[in-house]
Image (spheres, rainbow, N blue to C red):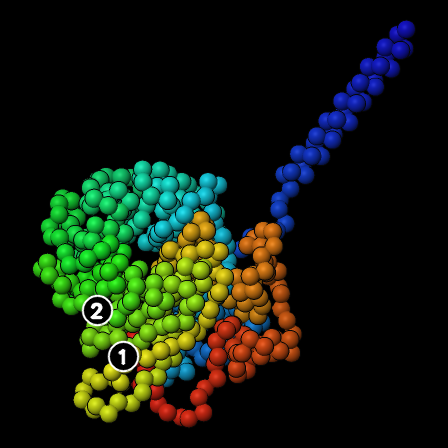
Amino acid sequence: MGNNNYSKQASRHLEKSRGYDHNMEQQLASQEKKTAFRRTVDHGNNMGRWHLERQLGNTTTQQPIGVVRPESSYLIDFLPSMAYASSQNLERHNRRNMAVMDLESKFVHLSSNKAKHTINTVKWTPEGRRLVVASFSGEFTIWNGMTFNFETIMQAHDQPILSLQYSHNDEWLLSGDQSGVVKYWQPNFNNVNIITAHASGVRDIAFSPNDTKFLTAADDSTLKIWNFNNGQEERTLTGHHWDVKSADWHPDLGLIVSGSKDNLVKLWDPRASQAITTLHGFKHTVVRTRFQPAGTKRLLASASRDRSCRVFDLRTMRDLLVLRDHDADMSCVAWHPLHASMLTTADYNGAMNHYILDSYISQPSEDKTPGNFGTDAPGTLEAAHKIPYAHEKAIHALEYHPMGHLLCSAGSDKTARFWSRARPQDPLSFKDPLYTDDKQGAWYYAVNNNINAIMDPSAVAGLLSNIGVGGDAGTAGAVPGLNMAQPSNPVAPMGIPGLRN
């Protein structure tokens, strides 16, 4: 009898130990680190290299485009955006424009909340370490700017957030919602003031050059200038006949621009309540107006739902270029923070185009008077690079990183997507589903994760020839989609005025 009890107890202990071992195996398996490669964009290495070269005096001449080739060993020669900016671009011939090195053509990461909502606006924090995403639910979501992982979320407004803007001194953030409320935020997202600015949605906010005043544009067809210190209204700008969709305050000049649903772009003197001039070039709603932040800061870009983006010269008071490369209505436009010649547009179908304005060659004019840069009719320009399926729905926000090496886009598909320059050893970067529309499963997490994917030179040359990239494959491999072939006639180009200091 005792032996039977002992055997039963032993069998029960054996079953428990087996179950324990099985549970331990499951726990250990669940704790194993994921083998999938997580993309990050670390700007430290090339910034350190460029800083050392500057200390050694090796940056007196610009880096030739052909230095960076599609092979991993050439990654060390990929310098930060500041090295390719117009202030460093000593050779002013169009074919040597270094902005071509900074086309944000490579998809890096997709970030989205668990409870997904449409995103109307995004902003990088002033130091560029984080991205603030404002959603239709009234929430702020903070994403890391290097690894793109989630950091925190907070309920900022009770209504959908339509606009965000940091002050020039980087000490304040303003947000506006659909009910017309504007909130003041400190860098730690402590809310210190709330004002009711308009009776309807605040579509855009802009600070004056010295941050003592700010501007709000709303759906009540007005713009208002506010004293930042006491939150009191100082002036109302009336003249638009419909919703004001966008506004901007020039970073240097006493000049305000606004774009409205009445198809008009107006320029204002902040000291008066009358419009200085009205631009009548568009045939549909003007969705975005932005002053040029670099170079001479004398150009103005405006995007409209008539599928066009116009580049306006403030000195000659006329259009220089009309960009019509999109197949759908344009939704937003953004200037590169360092390259005065780089412009990015997006449309309601989710496509995104990059333009290099220096590639435009103006035609000689019969009028030889000083200040005449070409014919009276504005020219046209094809996109340097196109991403046809950047988003699945409309893109509402484009925001460049302060250093210029990253671009964030967000919109109606309720996601924020990050873009960077293509790696030299990644000649298939334009084979992503963003270009082919071949989306299967979790395509945005799995595409091109092989960081050592290097093709032999013959395959690269064949691939580049298929997509229409001219010139040497090794030279153009890091700049997919751009035709580097030079014109046969050696005519010295005039280029667009206002791109450099």
Percent position of residue 444, x then y: 55, 54
Number of residue marks: 2
Q: Can you say which quadrant of the picture contains the N terminus?
A: top right
Q: Determine whether 156 is above or below 60 in the image.
A: above
Farthest residue, direction left: 272
Which quadrant of the view contains residue 255? bottom left
Q: Which residue is mark 2?
A: 279
Please state the horizontal and vertical placement of residue 81, each as a whole percent of the image: 40, 67
Residue 425 in sight: no
Q: Amino acid at mark 2?
A: Leu
Q: Indicate left or right for 95 with 466 as reference.
A: left
Q: Which structural element holds mark 1?
A: loop
Q: Residue at 44%, 49% (x, y): give it.
A: 414
> Which of 264 and 166 lies nearest the eye of the viewer?
264
Residue 282 location (% of width, % of height): 28, 68
- 185 vs 73, left or right, is left
Give the left or right position of residue 457, taking residue 128 as reference. Answer: right
Can residue 232 be seen by looking at this rendering?
A: yes
Above/below status of 491 relative to 383: below
Q: Which quadrant does the C terminus fall into?
A: bottom left
Which residue is drawn at the image coordinates 34% and 87% (left, top)? 493
* Amino acid type assigned to the residue bearing label 1 in the image: Pro
Q: Is residue 17 left or right of residue 394?
A: right
Disc 1 vs disc 2: which is toward the camera?
2
Residue 189 screen position, x and y as percent: 31, 42
Residue with the mark numbered 1: 497
